[in-house]
Image: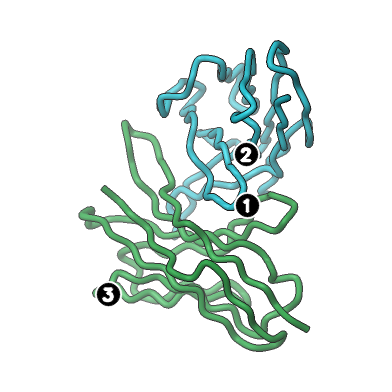
Chain colours: A cyan, B green
Amino acid sequence: DTEVTQTPKHLVMGMTNKKSLKCEQHMGHRAMYWYKQKAKKPPELMFVYSYEKLSINESVPSRFSPECPNSSLLNLHLHALQPEDSALYLCASSLRLAGRGETQYFGPGTRLLVL
Amino acid sequence: AQKITQTQPGMFVQEKEAVTLDCTYDTSDPSYGLFWYKQPSSGEMIFLIYQGSYDQQNATEGRYSLNFQKARKSANLVISASQLGDSAMYFCAMRAIIQGAQKLVFGQGTRLTINP
């Protein structure tokens, strides 16, 4: 089972709104990730949590605030976003497997539109 | 620094034909991992196949195989007997370790279209 779930699937928000994206996995993976993906581009890493601690922040603006309440759950809190933040937001989690190294498994993503 | 290059922005292939998607990489690390992901229009990134730098044999997963040529720093994905459902964006990626955490470095992707 390599399922990562994300909610909501779609989100439309205004620039003054506060919203949150949710990501969940029950595979016992030790690391979780947030990516941002613009159309026709590869995903760009935003944050990495390892054992529930923030280990990488790729200089993401403070209007994006990650949270890892427990080993299965990852949130991304959004506040005062800009229209250029409209994108597909992907969550992933990873596990080291014999003969495979640490493989990331992705959720279906949240398509965000900021008006 | 690690870098992935995918030189084919788009490819068109007839159904049931085999297709090769190119990927070259650059790294100074002796130990590294290479991945291929498929991204349909729905958006989900689907893990396809992994090749470790010390693996002696090319990786295979069902209809997917990875043609790993270490000296040429290439890790091409081969899809045998292509199907309409293979139409998607394909990303080659390399694992980088930063501050003890894993980061994937992606190529720009190749959009594959399978024609009936």
* Vertical side of B19 occupied by B53: above or below: above
Q: Is residue B19 above or below residue A83?
A: below
Q: Chain of mark 1?
A: B
Residue occupying image coordinates x 77% and y 29%: A11
Q: CA distance from mark 3 to mark 1?
A: 27 Å
Percent x, y for residue A73?
A: 65, 25
* Residue type of the residue flagged with mark 1: Met
Q: Is residue A75 above or below residue B27?
A: above
Name the residue tied to disc 2: A90
> How crowded is the residue under tag 1: few (<14 C-alpha within 10 Å), some, or many (20+)?
many
- Identify residue for label 3: B72
Residue denoted by label 1: B45
Q: Secondary structure at mark 3?
A: loop
Write the residue at 49% across / 40% down.
A44
Please report whichever mark, 3 or 1, sits nearer to the chain's N-terminal start: 1
Q: Residues within 10 Å of mark 2 (few under 14, many from 20)?
A: many
Quick one: SS at disc 1?
Answer: loop
Can you tell which quarter of the image residue B80 is in? Answer: bottom right
Secondary structure under tag 2 reads strand
**Real-space CA distance between mark 3 and mark 2, rounded to the nearest whole angstrom:** 32 Å
Mark 1 vs 2: CB contact within 8 A:
yes
